[in-house]
Amino acid sequence: MWVFGYGSLIWKVDFPYVTKIVGYISGFQRKFYQHSVDHRGIPGKPGRVVTLVPGAETDKVYGIAYQISEQDRAIVIDHLDYREKGGYVRTPILFYPKDKYAGPADEDVIAHQVVNSKGPSGTNVEYVFNLAKAMRNIAPDVVDEHLFTIERKVQSLLKHNSSSVVFSTTLS
């Protein structure tokens, strides 16, 4: 289970977690639209805390996602139910880690990026080919449709590019 913190959970984490990742959710806006009589104000003189309101598809709310271990799941949920008693709704949502996750893309776009990328550890083409080969070796009965589709599209791009270099697919 993961918990997304967009308000005080960013700096006041009072529950156990395995790891945390900075990132964002899409389609919402963070607004100081919620009264707080339990944490940031009192009855008759409420404070204001943030809540999430629906926004445009392009809107992003940055925060921190906390991975909760299965063994701590129940105690964290109970704790958050109490801590956030002023109101919250558990809502499944797609989280995008900042600078660590490229996100969904068309497979042709991915293949073009792979063919045109090279870094200190080698070419992106080598990475795709070595991964596909390794998967066929360790799990020959498993068909990883996404991986093998990217591999085929990269091979096709390389065939159609007369100036392409032949890349080794040896494992190292």
Image (tube, rainbow, N blue to C red):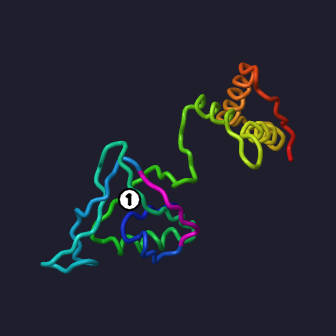
Residue nearer the viewer, 65 or 69: 65
Q: Residue at x 55, y 32 (%)?
A: 106
What is the number of callouts on the image?
1
Q: Which residues are magenta?
A: 17-25
Category of crowding for the residue at label 1, using alpha-carbon neighbours closer than 10 angstroms: few (below 14), some (14–19), many (at least 20):
few
Residue 96, magenta (yes or no): no
Residue found at the very far left of the displayed protein: 44
Up/down of 87 relative to 170, above or below: below
Q: Residue at x 42, y 74 (%)?
A: 79
**Residue type marked 1:** Arg
Q: Is residue 7 left or right of residue 159?
A: left
Q: Is residue 128 left or right of residue 14?
A: right
Q: Residue at x 22, y 76 (%)?
A: 37
Q: Residue 95 placed where, x, y %?
A: 47, 52
Q: Residue 101 placed where, x, y %?
A: 57, 49
Q: Can you tell which quarter of the image residue 114 is in?
A: top right
Q: Residue 116 placed where, x, y %?
A: 67, 34
Residue found at the very far front of the displayed protein: 163
Residue found at the very far bottom of the displayed protein: 42
Q: Residue at x 85, y 35 (%)?
A: 168
Q: Disc 1 marks which residue?
A: 90
Up/down of 67 relative to 149, above or below: below
SS at badge 1: loop
Principal secondary structure, stretch drawn in magenta: strand
Residue nearer the viewer, 16 or 82: 16
Residue 21, magenta (yes or no): yes
